[in-house]
Image (spheres, rainbow, N blue to C red):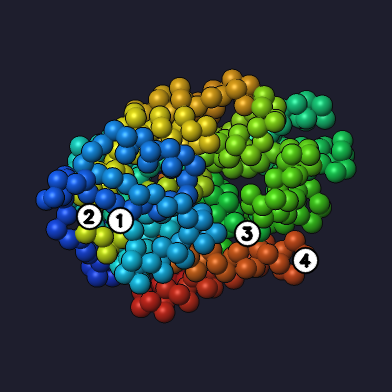
Amino acid sequence: MSRSPSRTSLAVAGAATALAVLTACGGGGDDTSAAGGDGKPVSITFWGWAKGSKEVVDAFNASHTNIKVVYEEIPSGNAGGYAKISNAVKAGNAPDLVSIEYPQLPEYVSQGALQDIGPYFTEDIRKKLLPQAVELTTLGGKNWAVPFDASPQSFYYRKDLFAKYGVQVPKTWADFRKAAEKVKKADKKARIGTFFPDDPTTFQAMAWQAGAQWYKPEGDTWKVNTTDAATGKVADYWQGLLDDDLIRANASFSPEWTNSLKNGGTIGYLGAAWGAGVLKGTLPEQSGKWAVAPMPSWDGKPASGMLGGSTFAVPKTSEKAGAAVEFATWMSTTEAGIKARIESGTSSAFPAAASLRPVAKKAFDADFYGGEDIYQVFEDAAASIGPDWSWGPTTGTTNTTMKDQFGKVASGGTTVGAAVQAGHDATVAELKKRGLKVEDAG
């Protein structure tokens, strides 16, 4: 991921002031990562949902005697996982380690739900990881999570059906629309891809790719503009695809979406690096029929946003932060940790630890993609991630509002642009409600 260090550092510095409420966060008890006084290993609990997590926990427990990890799989964040984590923190019975995606991290930090892991997240660990990923987990001059992966965008497509229909892999969004028209003309039941009404994060990655800046910390003020020209361009584009019935509108990873992929009704997927494992695990019978290409861009030059991406954070109530960070570090920065996840056959994670990407590439069985070097596609995409995006402390409010409104788009109840405007308005209102200074640029 190529992100301007100077711009990102300025954004983080601004966020440090704008998120003054971070000082309310803290926690951590008399922790040790070594065996307890009774000679038994320290036992920690870990909540997550990423593919391959169970296999990683099993591999860690098999190779470590000082820490025992108890894993509980929870729904993915936007499907209920974040609500479960928040409720557990409020109730005082949260686990010792949780998965949190980059966009949601500032919100958890601002609400005082996490603890600073700086004492355990040493420089030796940080230097193994993508500096920009570390910056995304650094707020108020403190470290709040261990970055696990980066998630550049990618376009997955059925190469056999593209060939059958005479469709070229699109390099630009104009090309993508033409390809969508050609797919529909070749097979009136087929579509090139899907608009996910339940998943505003995919739209946000598109806006990021187009050069939008939704949150911009300036001094002690959050400048908010989720309706800038770049975002408007993306909204109008997707509205046009929907209006002309060139794209499906199915909930992400729903039975409808899956069945459409299985029967050739949908022959493309605009996702992220981790999506390669999702498709492979969902459609094993289509092995060899799929390929991966760079995301279409507006001018044909490489460009990407980030769609998701995971970190590991320690809830404020845990008294075992050292052990939790030791396990998180093992998952993120060791060859054994990456191999265990990728060799599960369900994960295509793109590690934040650049030195481990060759390990991930070697561990991933690329037969599903006809032996294509998909990690090189991810590497190139990561190098093109836009430098000016920052996440704010009210992402949950933004996403909930947009999700509610996106659900009405397919039926004609609203438009993509109006849904984004509603998200903007809700974001500004929530920031003000929390007592933060806001400049409404929308």
What's the CA distance linking mark 4 and mark 3? 16 Å
> Is 266 situated above or below 141?
above
- Quickly name the residue at label 2: 320
In the picture, measured across the screen, residue 259 lies left or right of residue 93, that is: right
Element assignment for label 3: loop
Counting from the top left corner in percent of width and height, residue 431 is at 42, 73
Q: Earlier in the sequence, mark 3 or mark 1?
A: 1
The residue at which mark 4 appears reads as 412
What is the three-letter code of the residue carrying label 2? Answer: Lys
Task: From the image, tell me which residue sits under label 3.
Answer: 198
Residue at (72% x, 63% y) in the render: 409
Point out the tag, 2 or 1, that comes first from the N-terminus: 1
Residue contact at pointers 2 and 1, CB within 8 angstroms = yes
Q: Residue at x 21, y 45 (%)?
A: 41
Q: Is residue 343 left or right of residue 46?
A: right
Q: In the image, which is nearer the foreground, mark 4 or mark 3? A: 3
Q: What amino acid type is highlighted by mark number 4?
A: Gly
